[in-house]
Amino acid sequence: MEQNLALVKYIVKRFLGRGVEFDDLYQWGCLGLLKAIDRFDPDYPVKFSTYAVPVIMGEIRRCLRDDGPVHVSRTIHEQARKIDSYIRECEAERRRTPDVAEIAEATGIDREGVVLAMNSKKAVRSLYEPVRGEDGPRLMDVLGADTMSKVDTRLMLSRMLRDLPDKERAVIIRRYFQSHTQTQIARDMGMTQVQVSRMESRILKQMRSMAEG
């Protein structure tokens, strides 16, 4: 173990810059080294270091994938995979994205658990990340600011989307929340690009009218 700690440090340097501290990467690398020691057979026609490198790298990659910068329990990971599977199935069969209530009913996970599992897959943001442009305020500068007006706007938008027919809601969600092109939507929904464009314009006009009223 002691003879190969330098090898672990060398490998860890290749994974720096991913939002994880060196010490955490080093601990994961040491776990990989222990696994390599446990599994290595002296009769193998390779040096131990040659055998250990992919095992150590594999352990670090696994921890980055499963845990990331913030630890998430295995139960939440499993729930997230179950939710992803249902969402893909729903989008393929019904050509729309299910809401939280539907996901909860279909998977047997309560609504809070659904939101937690879905958010667990999002990347962790740095407090030093610029909010608007390189010279703009940092995330830490705006945390705690009064955002109620934005919350009210989002709630109103949520209600308007909820009241739309399924097909129209799917078009707006895909266009403005998933950045799909009109051509992509037309192909997937069995429509022409012109039909999608007209539908989008009509829905936006309707939503603006509702917001102003």
Image (spheres, rainbow, N blue to C red):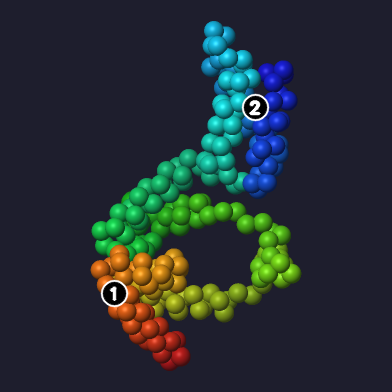
| Residue 119, image x, y percentages | 50, 55
Q: Residue 12 occupies which quadrant of the picture? A: top right
Cα separation, mark 1 vs mark 2, equals 56 Å
Residue 208 to residue 100: above or below: below
**Of 16 and 31, the residue lying toward us:** 16
Residue 33 image-quadrant placement: top right
Residue 203 locus on image (x, y percent): 36, 82
**Tag on residue 192?**
1
**Residue occupying the far bottom of the picture:** 213
Dot 2 surroundings within 10 Å: few (below 14), some, or many (20 or more)? many
Q: Residue furthest top?
A: 43
Q: Tell me which residue sits at (57%, 9%) in the image.
A: 42
Q: Which residue is mark 2?
A: 30
Residue displayed at 44% across by 53% down:
113
Residue 192 placement, left or right of 75: left
Q: Residue 23: percent from the left, percent from the top?
A: 71, 36
Q: Amino acid at mark 1?
A: Thr
Kind of residue sitting beneath label 2: Cys
Q: How many marks?
A: 2
Identify the mark at residue 205; answer none if there is no mark. Answer: none
Above or below, 140 against 110 in this view is below
Depicted 64 relative to depicted 127: above or below: above
Q: Secondary structure at mark 1?
A: loop
User: Which quadrant of the rendered structure holds the C terminus?
Assistant: bottom left
Q: Residue at x 49, y 75 (%)?
A: 154
Q: Position of residue 52 (x, y in %)?
A: 60, 22
Q: Is residue 130 left or right of residue 54?
A: right
27 lies above or below 117: above
